[in-house]
Image: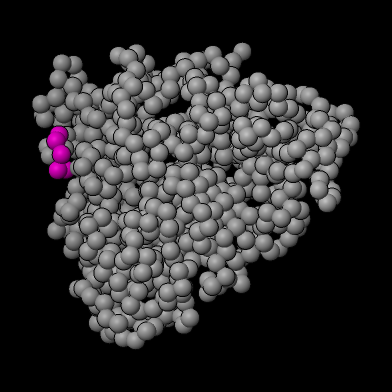
Amino acid sequence: MLAKNEISRGWRDVETVRFPRVTPPREVEVLVVGAGPSGLATALELNHDRVQVAVVDAATSASLVRAGAMGHSSRTVELFRRWGVYEAIRAGWTFPPEWNHGGGRLRTSLVGHDLLDPPGPSFRKRPGNDFSFEDSIRRPQTVLQHAFLRRLAERGTTVAGGWRLLGFHEGEDTVTALLEDVDSAERREVRARYLVGADGGSSDVRRRGSSGGSGTGSASGGVINWAGTWSVSTWDPVVAGGTRNTQYLDLVYDSLTQVDSQGNAHPQQARSWEYNTTGDAVTFHLRPGLKFTDGTPVNAEAWQYQINRAKTQKNSQLAGDLDSVRSIDVIDDLTFRINLTQPDHHIPTLFGARGAGLLASETAARNNPQALATTAPVGSGPFKVESLTPDASVSLVKNPDFWDAENIHVDRIEITFNNDPNSVVQGIRTGTYNFAIGDVAQIDPAKKAGLQVLDDWGYGYQGYFVPVNLNKAPFDNPKVVQAIHYAVNREQFVEQAAFGHGEVTAEPYPSYYPAYAQEAKDLHPYNPDKARQLLAEAGYNTTDRRLSLPFVVSQPTPPDEVLQSQFKAVGVDLDIKVDPNWSTSFFAKTLAITDYSYAGRDSFGQTLTANFGGGPLNLSGPFQSAEFKAALAKVRATPLDSPDLKKNLAAATVAGLTSNPNIYTYATPRPYILATGISPLPKLPGQISFRGVTIGSS
């Protein structure tokens, strides 16, 4: 019997797709190998243009590890309408989640709280974007496959499951594909004018065809097909700051230094650097011959412009992290000096990839900053943009002018954005993709499926926390702030949201991190009775004057629901609302309370300023206490090899926690999931580097 979930699926079995068990035709104009969303969509588009097409797939069915929402951009919705499948996709959920923008409240049963009927769906038009009049839509991958299969059947297009491609031969005008029935071992030849490989970057079609796929066992070349689970909000590194966007930006831009898993800075664009005797100035020496992909040079003036822009640009997310930078002097074409307001030994790590270190072309930033941020990023990194559709996909090709190009063995990277995280394992297992950044929910299913999972803490971590804004009511009342801290049971987060792979933390980082403060766990221990008492002193109670908080998020997550249940237990109603423009409100610091998944920074000092100082994660900024400022100054004045560093970092952490209202709950590893033919990535926390990575057969 199918599990019933009235909200997301009704009685529909959207978790499983069964492909027709029919025989492929002997001849067809186009044969598509792979019946995933990409292969079926290819068939729909060809069918729309009256091209005779057939689809085969070795699998007889496809399923998700766990059904969930998958984001599809406005441009994709335009195609759904073109193919005549939009209504079927839209109807694939009993209660489409986009209806809930009108203020209706739903309560799920994840942690046992009530399910309340919404007052009614709202069809209020959301603001359009710059690229389409359509709204985006969220549906599981399997809902798309169901709709695509029905439409293809209506049009008489063959989709044959259970037929494996054994090989093919290219003639002068045709391709002859050899297929085998997975059950009977019957073999069948199919002649086509064109053969399309839609079964992943490691498929035989792509390896042996001309699309840039690698040969079997190849140590050089190949395609990374990346299932991105979020989209890039900006390609401008100054605006992106040190957020998770940098894991995409790492591919296009290069950094001044590279920071390893121990927090040590190594040469990257800078071949060397040295401090003055007082520690308040550091001089960097660049590698000669570096250039951006627009042909302009990477030089000292480019770095001077970038740092000044990061300090002064209105929407910069790096200004607070650069508050110790006074000025930049250009010494010569390859040498510049950063002058500081105080001794700061963390500058080399600050200019790593997850800090202020990703350099954009000065020419691009001056001439067309909008294009730089949206459609035409220009850097000097290992890859360059070939094509980019905002909120949908990006195609990258190897940059032959990258200073370490000889160690880049990947020819292309194809990234599609906004994939449902719960579809990632299935997508890699079936060959649609071969790489993804997952979350802890995918670790066990990926290992069970025989995929590579890089889940060592050294690859980075993700911490769930609740930013709170002291400048917004009711958090301008200290008793309310204290109450919600005491309401939080961190152990429950680990039990219900970490899938056995996390740890409790009352600070921005896990226990292995050098700035971790053991005493932080005792600052606000779980005490619901004390939370109720403080709320009562603030004028609230659990009956007729309950505190209600709008909780605006980009998308609801399991830890949000855990928090909602814990707040409810002490008399606080957390009203979870989805806002597609959440990031704009968050970085403008106009929200009162929200959620955030934090992936750390390269620099210990920047980690502190991002959370407790003038950085982007402090919703109460520019507020920072005098105690924290003093502790931060002491950290900056401490050399990275000093035995006092860990002690001073912990003291700064405690100073930040005692003055900042953010609620930190738990941390988990951030796993990379790879097809078996890809060699492991370098262990660089929170960074994506394909240096030295090779692609063979899966």
Which residue: 41% across, 71% down?
256
Q: Nearer the viewer, residue 642 or 30?
A: 30
Placement of 9 over or under 260, stated as above or below: above
Main secondary structure type of the part rendered in magenta? loop
Q: Nearer the viewer, residue 335 or 439?
A: 335
Question: Would residue 349 appear left or right of 405 to someone viewing this image?
Answer: left
Q: How many marks?
A: 0
Q: Is residue 606 magenta?
A: no
Farthest front residue? Answer: 50
Residues in magenta? 470-474
What x and y, as percent, mark residue 399? 55, 67
Which residue: 22% across, 46% down?
589
When asked about the image quadrant of residue 581, the answer is top left
What x and y, as percent, mark residue 683? 53, 60
Placement of 281 over or under 163, stated as above or below: below
Which residue: 16% across, 58% down?
627
Question: Would residue 215 appear left or right of 112 to someone viewing this image?
Answer: right
Which residue: 24% across, 71% down?
325
Question: Would residue 536 appear left or right of 609 to someone viewing this image?
Answer: left
